[in-house]
Image: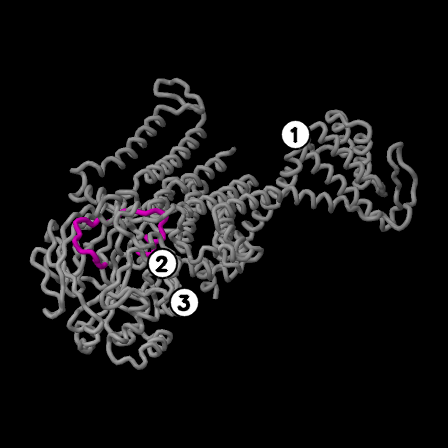
Amino acid sequence: MNQRKHLTLIAAGSAFLASLPLTNVFENYTWAIRSFLVVAVMCGVGLLVRSLRAPSWAPSAAMALSGLLALTWLYRSHEEYLGIVPSPGTIVHFGQLLRTASEEMSEYATPVGDREGFLFLATLGVAAVALLVDLFAVVVRRPALAGLPMLAIYSVPVTVDTDSTSWFPFVLGALGFLWLLVTDNVDRVRRFGRRFTGDGRDVDLWEPSPLAAAGQRLGALSVVAAVLLPLIPFAMPAGLLDSLGGGAGGGSGAGIGNGKNGKSVSMFALLSGQLNRNKSVEMVKVTDLDDTQPFYLRFNVLEDLSAKGFSARPISGGAPVGNGFGKPEWGPSVKSATHTARVEVTNELAINYLPIYTWPTKIDKVSNNWAFDPKTAVVYSNKETTAKKSYNVTYTRPEISPDDLRAAAPVDTSSPQLKDLATAPANPVVKSKVEELIKGKTTEYDKVKAIFDFFSPDNGFTYDTSTGADTSGTKIADFLNNKRGYCAQYAAAFGWLLREAKIPARVAFGFARGGSPAGTKAMMLTNFNLHAWTEVYFPGYGWLPFDATPSTAIGGSVQTSYMPAAETANGNDDPNRRGSQPLPSGSAAAGDPGLTGHENPGNTGGGDINTKLSLSQRVGNFAASAPGIALMAAVLLLLLLALPGFARARTRRRRLTFAAAGPGTPVGVPVGDGPQMTVLPEDDRSALVARDNAHRAWDELLDTMTDYRVTIDEAETPRATVDRLVRKERLRDKAESGARLLSTVEEHARYARSPLSARELRTALSSVESAFAANATRKVRLIARFLPPSVLRRWRTNAGIRSSALTLSIGRGWDSLMRTLSVRRMVARRSGR
């Protein structure tokens, strides 16, 4: 393997190693499999083109084209030509994937799942880095510049994730860059000739010199120092080590990361990602709870509503928790009870909002870095996260009846505090549905109940966590029509419809009730207990929770005294979420009771949905899976390997389809004692055909010699070539007669006034090829059949000719342009006027 081929492999491997830190960004390894396939295809094409001795720019162009084809195959729009050649629809599809990834960047927390937009962006980025690394390292021969694109993708994880990340992929990426530098420098040193040590001792070609060995040791020490230096307390600012150990990534990597005031990560996307995980992760433990019917543990609320859905407002103001919490809005006539609970947050929940029961009256064992905002009833901090926090909460819970809410005063939508919370963006689907539902309803409570009852499974609504995190106007309209979604869609749609009805509403986030480990009174809350619901404002009672999600789909669902949870009339709604069954105290599995271990938290509906898929859908699903992609990659590789053999068979078939030398039997006399040949008249038109047949047969013989590695001497005459074949290749009997026939016909076609016409050219060629095959090894026979050197040589020659012609034409055009724009010529013209 020559130097450039060797560097091509090293460049591809280094580029892929540099991308490995992306494992901290993605939850699964789908991105790595697809990126590896694209880089492998590009590397293989680069090696193939460089083996053809193509110009320096050709391998990069071929790699870029092969990368585009690989991306087209992996991310199909189903509008491609032949399933792999991109079409205008493919480019539009790529643009949509990039736009989707751009929109979701601000919504999804790391690690993210297999979102198609993110996967395409990662694969495209790795392919671009691989192309640039190959360009800098192999073409430009400046491997140090290859560190720039490698650094760009290398730094992505620490840019998008403020929590600690695994160090091991970063070490692999650094080693990949050192590997590239060392390989290039070793190749440069080898071209100097013999190497010597300082004392004059000769160093073998493959033995590292003392200088190279010292460089390798320095590189290894640099990597170790770069990894260990941040762990030294005095080397980094205070608090960094705390963030390394206290971030969401500090545990199993399945937790929720930081989000300042909810603006950096969409709560809907966060909720969707956690509910669709394959593993249950304990996030909160509630103990010493004296409330027999507690509502949900709440930590955040979204109040802004636009055409893109609900979003959080930056929380400001409020007072430290040590200063008290004020009084709730319900009056003294409302019955309420005071309860206490101890909350312990694990390292897997690292957010800036404290999970509490509302309305809190006291929170012990937290610092005054935490403040309480009475408008949203949220406890937040800009300096700390909830990771590993333990605290006691004292709260009051009111007892309110439906009649109390029916008698509540009308909402004053002109109030500055409620004005923005009772309006909704224009949406014809939402508007028509609200007008239909609240028709004839006079009180705010009756309107709320009418809209609430609409989301009952009796109306066809189904719980489904696979519908995604989008709650924009278009998606809400789809949800109202398709009636399939998870708690985020239920909460957002319910709140949107209420605001369309001029009723203040917002979306709250927290945990539904969880299960208890056997023999304990503790309540464990996992990522599968994360939940969203709607809060509605009633004058004199404040913000009250309403959960429109069907109770049978939510484990630990709570029915309030003023509104029962939405459920089916027959109680037979299929739960599509882990832990969806009610969780009695003392259940066997904390946070995940009643599970056999075979449930899929991302199930999209009924259990027999796979049996309803059509054959084309099954084929499409298999093609998009990792085994399907691997199978298609193997088939594509086999087709590429078989291409030279197909080209050789086509050329041979075209050559052996000899044209008839003339009508009827040729006129002439026998020549020699061998196979029957006839001399054609000089002026006969069939002479032209006979010459062409002779030349094609001789070309086929030369290609056959090339395929079986038989030496060709272009200075020899056909007769000398055949004599050498008979002597060195030991041609006997039919093979010898056939070879002499081919040489005689070719000689007459070249030198004689009248060519010969022979009917046995095909048989002669077959006899000679059989003799070559009998004398060759098995390896040579296989290569001659599947990777014939004659085809590769012809491709290489044609590529060189075409590239030279293209280079020459570009050079001529450039010279012509320079002459046209030459200042000297312009001055000469003006002076001559």
Rendered image coloring scheme:
one colour
Q: Nearer the viewer, residue 491 or 829?
A: 491
Seen in the picture, residue 739 relative to 264 is either above or below; the reply is: above
Looking at the image, residue 270 lies above or below residue 238: below
Q: Earlier in the sequence, mark 3 or mark 2?
A: 2
Task: Specify the label residue 16 is tagged with.
Answer: none
- Residue 403 percent coordinates (x, y): 21, 74
**Disc 3: CA contacts within 10 A as few (<14), some (14-19) or many (>=20):** some
| Residue 820 in sight in this render | yes
Picture disc at residue 102: 2
Residue 778, label in figure:
1
Q: Which residue is mark 3?
A: 460
Between residue 236 and residue 769, name the one nearer to us.
236
Question: Which region shows up in magenta?
Answer: 271-295
- State whether residue 99 appears in this view: no
> Is 75 included in the stretch rendered in magenta?
no
**Quarter location, residue 775:** top right
- For badge 1, the amino acid type reads Arg
Mark 1 or mark 3: which comes first in sequence? 3
